[in-house]
Image (spheres, rainbow, N blue to C red):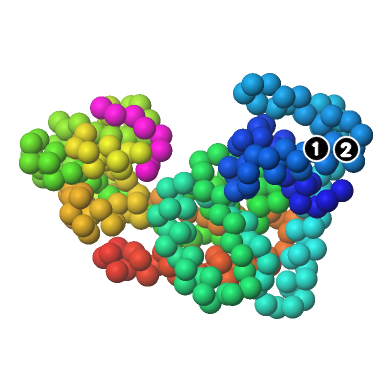
Amino acid sequence: MNFDDVRVFDRIAELKGISATARALGLPKSSVSRALARMEAVAGSALVERSTRHVRLTDAGVLLHAHAVRILADIADAETALEGLAGVPRGRLRVNATHAFGVGVIAPMLPAFLARYSQVQVALDADDRRIDLAARDTDLAIRIGSMADSALIARRLPSVDLWLCASPAYLAAQGTPRTVAELAAHRLVDRQDRTDWRFADAGAIDVEPRVIIPDASAQKVVVEGGAGIGNLPDYLVRPAVASGHLVRVLPDVIAATIEVHALYPSHRSLSAKVRVFIDALAEHMRVTASLAGGR
């Protein structure tokens, strides 16, 4: 079996679709289909059943996928061992993060990182889909919020501040709140229905948002459009605040912070490429927050 075809088949099994796999891997659909056809030819059996919307693994596909997962994990372990022997960060680094964090934090730090470590290739999977990192061929995942998964090794990164923000047009029309209590009279944008916004030095308020959007990037777009006041991660709104597209509301109030962790599977040793990436990411977050007047 061709190793690249095994990777493609593994992603097909995970994403349950040819088109989704092609998008995730940055390949033409025809290349993904040919890889699957080659796998089926070697296996001597159909590995998936196709429908108009998705694919489902056959019994043979389920059996082969279990072996594929182990093969990919073994290859990743071998790569890690070789990197440790050489002592030089090199090879492909597969990173998973939310779309907002990928765009707002990881992408801006990549040019300097890649210039410094010329033998490292970064494959960034930036979406909000939670993956089983322990069973996947992903080297590193960035997770926002408190940690509970003991199967993974976690290194804590600098925390993220939440900034209350609104558009200049909204504040001109609705007024600018001067206290936390006054927020309750405004149109608020949040990720879930009926929650509370906590503040380190000003208590908390119950929030019944006017707009409910789970994705922080989409919240930012809505807030910039004048829909209300959002409580958004600083890395996402710093550029808009600097340009004047957004205005910080109650900037002197210390809002909540969110924990950020870099995770990698406990069954893998920490490779040189993962170590230097985590170090570079942590430094980038510290410097960015310092320049913006944060911690």
- Nearest to the observer: residue 193 or residue 224: 224
Decide: is 106 above or below 232.
below
In the figure, is residue 74 to the left or right of 238?
right
Which picture quadrant has residue 168? top left
**Mark 2, secondary structure of its residue:** helix
Q: Residues within 10 Å of mark 1 (few under 14, many from 20)?
A: some
* Amino acid bearing label 2: Ala
Give residue 41's mark: 2
* Residue at 32% from the left image edge and 46% from the top image edge: 232
Residue for badge 1: 37
Which span is picked out in magenta? 210-217
Q: Residue furthest top?
A: 51
In this rendering, is residue 77 above or below 50?
below
Q: Position of residue 192 (x, y in %)?
A: 38, 30
Against 281, residue 151 (above or below) is above
Viewer-proximal residue among 33 and 12: 33
Q: Position of residue 69 (x, y in %)?
A: 78, 45
